[in-house]
Image: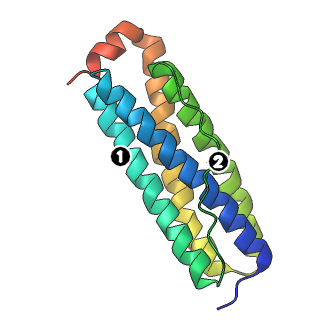
Amino acid sequence: MQGQPAVLDALNALLVNELAARDQYFIHSRMLSEWGLTKAAARIAHEMEDETSHADALIRRILMLEGTPRMTPAALNVGADLPGIFGNDLAVEISVVKHLREVIALCEREADFVTRELLLPMLRDTEEDHAHWLEQQLKLIGLVGLPNYLQSQMG
């Protein structure tokens, strides 16, 4: 089934960002693991898996609409410490939320309601799980202090 060119372009732009988010979470999870922050590493690895499933869904939809997935991720912003990691990951999630909302609106204008329905759970997941959790962690660091937070993340 041939998809609307504007929708295919928008899906590819989302894909590029999901791939970058996946790769950024991947490096961050390994950094946190190396630092002995196993709880934070496990959570960030979970986020990487979620981003991988989002990318998979986008790839499948692009292919179904007879498009070609763009598999080159956007640039990464790797953090140097735990607050930097969480802050950089939160910035990616906020950007993805904005972009998802724009693409959902585009799908409505183009009457591509199947793609819209595919994107709604991604928006929910990004807003309510990924971004919310990162915001909570940054607030906790502010409340209990970085040394106490770091101790709580050790295995």
Q: Is residue 77 above or below residue 81?
A: below
Q: Which tag is nearer the camera, tag 1 or tag 2?
A: 2
Q: Is residue 72 above or below residue 86?
A: below
x%, y% of residue 147?
A: 36, 7
Q: How crowded is mark 2: few (under 14 residues within 10 Å), some or many (20 or more)?
A: some
Q: Which residue is drawn at 59% across and 61% down?
A: 71
Q: Residue at x 26, y 29 (%)?
A: 38
**Residue tagged by mark 1?**
46
**Viewer can see residue 109:** no
In the foreground, 37 or 132: 37
- Quadrant location, the N terminus: bottom right
x%, y% of residue 54?
A: 49, 61
x%, y% of residue 3?
A: 70, 83
Q: Which callout, 1 or 2, points at the residue further toward the start of the chain?
A: 1
* Total numbered circles: 2
Q: Distance between the residues labelled 1 and 2?
A: 20 Å
Q: How crowded is mark 1: few (under 14 residues within 10 Å), some or many (20 or more)?
A: some
Residue 112, image quadrant: bottom right
1 left or right of 79? right
In the foreground, 49 or 118: 49
**Secondary structure under the numbered disc 2 in the rendered image:** loop
Q: In this view, does 16 lie above or below 66?
A: above
108 left or right of 145? right
Q: Which residue is drawn at 31% across and 25% down?
A: 34
Name the amino acid type tagged 2.
Ala
- Quadrant location, the C terminus: top left
Name the amino acid type tagged 1.
His
41 left or right of 127? left
x%, y% of residue 66?
A: 64, 84
Q: In this view, does 76 lie above or below 40?
A: below
**Residue tagged by mark 2?**
74
In the foreground, 13 or 142: 13
